[in-house]
Image (cartoon, rainbow, N blue to C red):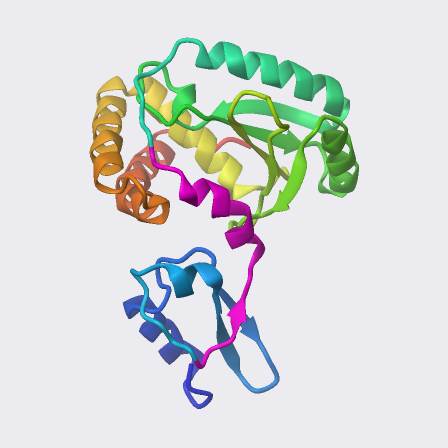
């Protein structure tokens, strides 16, 4: 960003192009002015123009997602074993975390009966107290989970699954976590609206074919549909907690 450019002007210009869709980009404050730092993903992804004069940050989000970004996107038919897999994982987490966890929820598409999904279980752990997080990290490490940071999404912390365990993503959320509220609202809305769940499944299959090797593109392409469903979900049911 030009050092004389105002923050407002910068926001407008970034919305037009530079990393506007890159969740790994970081904006920081300095004594001079706000400066935009590009992460490695934005410099290597062909969808983004190159700005070689800007500094580069090898951000934790990029490092954590590198392996996942390399694999193709595969959406499969709903598997009735997914809830059973979640229950197995939940039981182990509940035993390890004890009273530190207020709730352990199955979220994401695999939590919606009949919905096509990537065969990866998404799990949200809601903490009793945010101050317990360091202890939670220790308890999860004893179960084989590796803390990955927020992976570019503030308000929740991600953990890599133990080697050899069923494919799953684990997210730890404080009580005020907006992502947790969104996940539950989206899941519950789709569970009670099977026609819209089917439409979402059809969309994901179509996008998976178009963006098979492009996970960021796949995520961006379905975001408008997700946000529209969330608006309806929050309009019909008060957000949880």
Vertical position of residue 210 compared to residue 48: above or below? above
**Rendered residue at 53%/83% (across/down):** 33
Vertical position of residue 177 compared to residue 50: above or below? above
- Outermost residue toward the bottom in this view: 4
**Rendered residue at 73%/17% (across/down):** 95
**Rendered residue at 45%/33% (across/down):** 183
- Seen from the viewer's position, the closer of residues 131 and 89 is 89
Residue 141 located left or right of residue 118: right
In percent of width and height, residue 72 lies at: 35, 37
- Seen from the viewer's position, the closer of residues 174 and 234 is 174
**Quadrant location of the N terminus in the rendered image:** bottom left
**Quadrant location of the C terminus in the rendered image:** top right
In percent of width and height, residue 65 lies at: 49, 46
Find the magenta span and give its range: 53-73
In percent of width and height, residue 143 lies at: 72, 26
**Rendered residue at 35%/19% (across/down):** 191
Q: Quadrant of residue 42?
A: bottom left
Count of picture labels: 0
């Amino acid at each position: 960003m030009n050092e004389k450019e105002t923050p407002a002007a910068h926001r407008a210009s970034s919305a037009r192009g530079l990393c506007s869709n890159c969740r790994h980009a970081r904006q920081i404050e300095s004594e001079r002015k706000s400066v935009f730092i590009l992460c490695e993903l934005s410099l290597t992804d062909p969808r983004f123009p190159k700005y070689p004069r800007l500094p580069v940050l090898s951000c934790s989000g990029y490092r954590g997602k590198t392996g996942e970004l390399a694999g193709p996107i595969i959406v499969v038919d709903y598997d009735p074993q997914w809830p059973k897999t979640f229950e197995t994982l939940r039981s182990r987490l509940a035993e390890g975390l004890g009273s530190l966890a207020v709730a352990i929820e199955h979220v994401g598409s695999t939590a919606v009966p009949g919905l096509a999904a990537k065969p990866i279980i998404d799990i949200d752990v809601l903490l009793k107290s945010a101050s317990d997080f360091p202890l939670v990290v220790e308890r999860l490490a004893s179960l084989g989970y590796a803390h990955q940071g927020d992976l570019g999404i503030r308000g929740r912390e991600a953990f890599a699954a133990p080697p050899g365990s069923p494919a799953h993503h684990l997210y730890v959320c404080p009580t005020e976590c907006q992502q947790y509220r969104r996940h539950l609202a989206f899941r519950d809305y789709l569970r009670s609206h099977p026609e819209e769940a089917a439409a979402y499944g059809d969309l994901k299959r179509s996008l998976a074919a178009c963006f098979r090797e492009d996970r960021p593109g796949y995520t961006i392409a379905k975001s408008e549909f997700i946000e529209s469903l969330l608006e309806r979900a929050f309009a019909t049911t008060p957000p949880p907690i």
